[in-house]
Image (cartoon, helix red, strand yellow):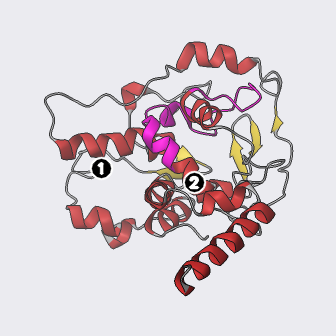
């Protein structure tokens, strides 16, 4: 004999199935592995993805934010799950290759304004979790403007030479003689947090000067300060609480860092 409870469950399952058929792949992403999605949400905040991929008057993660470089202007990509103008049609492998190798889904080489030289250190598990969260966002149909670069950088083949000179893919390797806390910090700073992308000086071709890592650099007519342990110009005299709160007060985050500080302290707007 079929109970009333069984009838209700069957009806609910049928209704849910109808909704999923109507909404398509996006709906399946919404009801997937919530653990992966929530972890991905944290990682997206840690990587400040929204800061670069959201225009001042745009929708979250829909891209088209202008990023000024010495070589021209690049407009950030739409990373919502829209299948045509975003990354909705990208597979896990394609998304990992973008993060790890600097390659778009169609094989085009990405510009390092998208900090793949840093993201290459992020583990496959973390990259998959980031993608899992991004797939829960509302798809936004929005095509970013074309980049405005000087010759020959306006041709993607130039990036093959740049990568050959300055880029070595590879996930983060923990220091065997370091604590778990140290390795966790190094993983975030050198990988997803890409702190050196702003706080490390660059050479004439736009690659970070590894010998001057985190010693401070000029960014968009502002100076990204020294993050090393130097007590006079760096963080050597700061406490853990000072760093978390962006203290001392005289050194609070200022433009353009204030935008990154805001997004790294809050969850994405979704």
Count neighbours of disc 1 (C-alpha within 10 A) and say few if under 14, some if 14 to 19, many if 20 or more: some
- Residue 184, above or below 27: above
Query: Circle 1 sits on which residue?
Result: 234
In the rendered view of the protein, which quadrant contains the N terminus? bottom right
User: Does residue 202 appear in this view?
Assistant: yes
Q: Position of residue 53 (x, y in %)?
A: 67, 55
Q: Give the number of marks.
A: 2
User: Does residue 217 appear in this view?
Assistant: no
Q: Position of residue 24 (x, y in %)?
A: 76, 58
Q: Which residues are magenta?
A: 101-129
- Residue occupying image coordinates x 49% and y 22%: 169
- Residue 112, above or below 55: above
Report if residue 126 lies within the magenta region: yes
Quarter of the rendering containing residue 93: top right
Q: Nearer the viewer, mark 2 or mark 1?
A: 2
Along the viewing direction, whichever of 257 and 39 lies nearer the viewer: 39
User: Callout 2: helix, strand or loop?
Assistant: helix
Query: Circle 2 sits on which residue?
Result: 49
Tell me the chief SS of the magenta region: loop
Distance Cα–Cα, label 2 vs label 1:
26 Å
Along the viewing direction, whichever of 260 and 54 lies nearer the viewer: 54
**Residue 135 located left or right of residue 23:** left
- Residue occupying image coordinates x 61% and y 55%: 134
- Residue occupying image coordinates x 58% and y 26%: 101
**Residue 106 located left or right of residue 40:** right
Along the viewing direction, whichever of 105 and 109 lies nearer the viewer: 105
Quarter of the rendering containing residue 161: top right
Q: Position of residue 224 (x, y in %)?
A: 47, 50
- Residue occupying image coordinates x 33% and y 70%: 245
Report if residue 138 lies within the magenta region: no
Q: Position of residue 3 (x, y in %)?
A: 53, 83
- Residue 226, above or below 5: above
């Amino acid at each position: 004999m079929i109970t009333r409870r069984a009838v209700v469950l069957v009806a609910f399952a049928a209704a849910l199935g109808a909704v999923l058929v109507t909404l398509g792949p996006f709906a399946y992403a919404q009801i997937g592995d919530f653990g992966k999605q929530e972890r991905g949400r944290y990682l997206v905040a840690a990587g400040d993805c929204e800061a670069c991929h959201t225009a001042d008057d745009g929708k979250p993660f829909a891209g088209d934010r202008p990023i000024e470089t010495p070589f021209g202007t690049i407009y950030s990509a739409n990373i919502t799950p829209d299948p045509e103008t975003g990354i909705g049609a990208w597979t896990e492998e394609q998304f990992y290759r973008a993060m790890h190798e600097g390659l778009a889904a169609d094989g085009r080489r990405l510009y390092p304004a998208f900090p793949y030289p840093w993201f290459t250190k992020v583990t496959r598990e973390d990259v998959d979790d980031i993608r899992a969260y991004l797939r829960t966002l509302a798809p936004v149909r929005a095509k970013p403007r074309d980049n405005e670069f000087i010759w020959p950088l306006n041709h993607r083949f130039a990036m093959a030479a740049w990568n050959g000179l300055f880029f070595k893919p590879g996930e983060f390797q923990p220091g065997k003689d370091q604590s778990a806390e140290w390795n966790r910090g190094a993983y975030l700073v050198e990988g997803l947090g890409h702190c050196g992308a702003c706080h490390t000086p660059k050479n004439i071709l736009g690659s970070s000067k590894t010998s001057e890592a985190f010693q401070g650099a000029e960014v968009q007519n502002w100076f990204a300060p020294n993050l090393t342990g130097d007590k006079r110009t760096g963080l050597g005299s700061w406490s853990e609480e000072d760093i978390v709160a962006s203290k001392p007060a005289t050194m609070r985050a200022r433009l353009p860092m204030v935008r990154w500080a805001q997004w790294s302290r809050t969850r994405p707007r979704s």
